[in-house]
Amino acid sequence: MPDVAVRPAIDGPDRHGPRACFRKMVIRPDDPRPRSERFGVLSCVRPEAREGPDVDDEAWMRLALTLAESTRAKTHPNPRVGAVIVKDGRVVGLGAHLAPGEAHAEAHALHMAGEAARGATMYVTLEPCNHHGRTPPCTEAIIRSGIRRVVVAMEDPNPDVEGGGIERLREAGLSVDVGLLRAEAERLNAPYLTAVAARRPFVWLKLAMTLDGRIATRSGDGRWVTNEASRRRVHELRDLSDAVLVGSGTVLADDPKLTARLPGARQPIKVILDGRLRTPASARLFDGAAPVLIFTAPGADEAHKARLISRGAEVIEVPLEAQAKTEARLSVRAVLEHLFRRDIRLLLVEGGAKVAGAFWSAELIDRVTVFIAPKIAGGGLSPLDGTGVLKMAEAVSLVDVAVERFDGDLAVTGRPDWATNGERRAP
């Protein structure tokens, strides 16, 4: 199995204008080719050239956000950042942070711009760092380059930065504007912001159900609720995620692989919640595509634990929920704490109903996508297991809602408004 490294290849202006390409390098121990010949182009961005002064700040910042988004969350645990340098209405530098330990977006953009950076404006989606980490501080590189103005979408809440980058640039005499397209930048880096504020992964719940709200028939058959286009979108979500989580009931009923079956996709870590350690050693998820973490209750069967470990699983004991000692219901907060320590920043929860209900009841869902198929089961299993609310006025509303169509299916994505819901339930 080859190692894969994604690295930037920033190309200067050609006959079509400036562009930035992002390349994947496949490294095999027995590959005789020099490293410079092991690249294959993943994608290129070439903005439309504009004449006149660089006054269209929003357009350039949107380009920077597009560059950041193109990294497909492969920067975790670092934030996704894009940078654009504009001079006299033309792009002279583009960059994105591609992977932990790699150069930051600002450094790539400055490298591409070269001397053309002097007197130019830089648009960057996150406040430039002003500290020494695995890479030098970006603020000093920006100052040395002669950039005259920096437009920042949002401040970096990381305590190592937190306004220090903006302050350093202003101290050096640069003009700095902050807050352009802030909401878009925050949405793009929601996993990073959750990590800083809550010290846990960002949790994205995926549900798939019929028009009458069933995830499976009364016999437990759930293949397939949604169509092929919707299922392809789920594979895209897995590609975005650091880990995908299901319960042992889903493993027993569906025997899923939990892989992202797309060309060039990265494979998320597979996480199983299994309070009674029922996951069979013969499960298809033991295919070697990604690590398998099985969380179980203390005192699990040692013989079965050994069988799972022999298949490559890591079996981790976590405490039970205080109110569910007899149900072997694991503490989802303890699970998230463990995953956070492993640098997992985006966790995709796929079910089943008990697992989804546990995260929902704990108000630990940050984003939810519900795929709805135009079919009626007339009974069967519900997507969330729990007591629910007493009054419809107490139901949790979704905000920032987006609706997409996948052939005949619909997908509704939004953010649970836990704060407003809590105010409704307050005595």
Image (tube, rainbow, N blue to C red):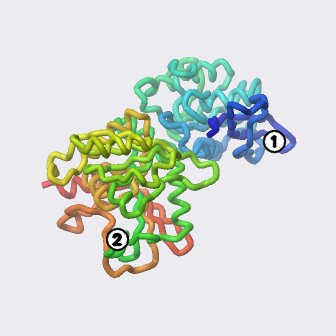
- The answer to whether 333 appears left or right of 413 in the picture is left
Pointer 2 residue? 220
Q: In this view of the protein, which residue sits in the foreground, 131 or 358?
A: 358
| Quadrant of the frame with the N terminus | top right
- Percent position of residue 29, x then y: 68, 31
Q: For the residues marked 1 and 2, what is the alpha-carbon distance in whole angstroms? A: 57 Å
Task: Give the residue type at disc 1.
Answer: Gly
**Farthest right residue in view:** 15
Which one is earlier in the sequence, the residue at label 1 or at label 2? 1
- Percent position of residue 17, x then y: 81, 41
Residue at 53%, 43% in the rendered image: 73
Residue at 78%, 28% in the rendered image: 34
Looking at the rendered image, the disc whose residue lies closer to the viewer, 1 or 2, is 2
- Percent position of residue 112, x then y: 73, 30
Mark 2 is surrounded, within 10 Å at the Cα level, by few (under 14), some (14 to 19) or many (20 or more) other residues, namely few
Mark count: 2
Task: Give the residue type at disc 2.
Answer: Gly
Q: In this view of the protein, which residue sits in the foreground, 167 or 83?
A: 83
Residue at 38%, 33% in the rendered image: 341
Can residue 184 be seen from the camera position used here?
no
Q: Which mark is residue 17?
A: 1
Q: Secondary structure at mark 2?
A: loop
